[in-house]
Amino acid sequence: MRRGGRAVASARKVRDERGLTAVVEFLSAFVLFLVIVSAFLALSQLKLGSNVADTDRLDKMAIDSLERLTDSKGHVVLRDAGIRDIGNSTDDWHFYNASTLLTADLLPAIGDGDGHLDLNRITALGNVTEDRLIHGLGIDEGLSINLTIIILQSSDESSIGEIIFSDGSHRSGATQGSTASRVMHLDGDSVRVTLEVHNAGREPSGLRITEFMADPLNGPPEWIELENPDGFAMNLSGWSMSRPGAFELIQDGAVAAGGRVICTGNSATQYNPYNVPMIDLASTGVLGTGTIDTLAAEGDSITLGWTRPGTVLTYDVIVISWDNTWNIQANHSMTYNLGGSPSSLTNWTAVDGGTPGW
């Protein structure tokens, strides 16, 4: 009996020791698990903290920029030969054209000074490039914006929901962004102003070829009409025009929203009934001067390109190629119907004499 009792006690002792060992191993594993989880959460918190800081910065930037845009009339200091003309600074920035505002020190605000919005100043945003608005509002240069102004309430029910202004860079591809909105009064209506700030970047917008004259008659130059269909003005810096064997950067300057510019082989003799800005491209042979033709009516091509600032890579934005099946007649321009491929004859209409700038 003693031997049996000793055996049972010994077996219990072994079981107890094994159980204790298992408990210790479990606790050790659990502690190790807690250490790993704590480290992971700490690292996650560090990363989350950085993202929160960036988000807070964008939130503040969007709110502050919206206040600058809507709280005042704005201000402009023009430049004369690159020198700031402080003596002629004015709140009436909305009276100046796109090319003038492109080089000015500008805050293009849209308020009327009494807590309401000014429709004339909103309309004048069409003379401001997105870059100049970003700079004027104090937004970091590497960021992009999108601005929308929409009618919420009006005595004219048909105008409710009407978009007064909408343009800027799309947010698709952005990893960070923030939006600020404000409801204000405009000529008795209630409108919402929404400013979005994001990091999606800016690409060339909708500058496009709308008409060209490849075979002028009796001396006039060849010409190409460009249009800016966007809500903001378009900076012409970086844009180019080319044909096989000839290439030329257009020039500095800007085209207002909805505005047109004529690229011509001879600005002195160019037919320009609407007095739109002209760009002379005769020096490189891209366009014929009138005495010398460069484009062939029976078959040729022209390309509107854009070069990203700081690079030498040029993107082909629009390429128009034609052949003898187009049957381009002398002194007939080709007008784009704004749909489909620009190299398809079905998307172009011949116009006797052309309508440059219209």
Image (cartoon, helix red, strand yellow):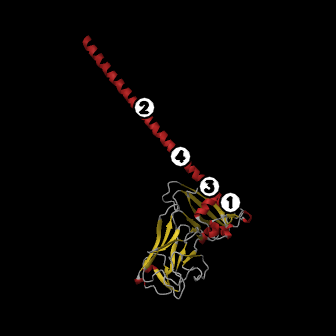
Residue 98, placed above or below residue 271: above
Q: Where residue 6 sits in the image (x, y, percent)?
A: 28, 14
Closer to the chain start, of discs 2 and 3, is 2
Q: Which residue is mark 2?
A: 31
**Residue 104 seen in the figure:** yes
Q: Which residue is mark 1?
A: 71
Q: Which residue is mark 4?
A: 50
- Type of the residue with mark 3: Ile
Q: Where residue 357 sits in the image (x, y, percent)?
A: 57, 79
Q: Which label lies toward us, 2 or 4? A: 4
- Secondary structure under tag 1 reads helix
- Type of the residue with mark 4: Ser
Closer to the chain start, of discs 1 and 4, is 4
Q: Which residue is mark 3?
A: 63
- Secondary structure under tag 2 reads helix
- Type of the residue with mark 1: Asp
Q: Are marks 1 and 4 in contact (CB under 8 Å)?
A: no
- Type of the residue with mark 2: Val
Residue 130, placed above or below residue 294: above
- Secondary structure under tag 4 reads helix
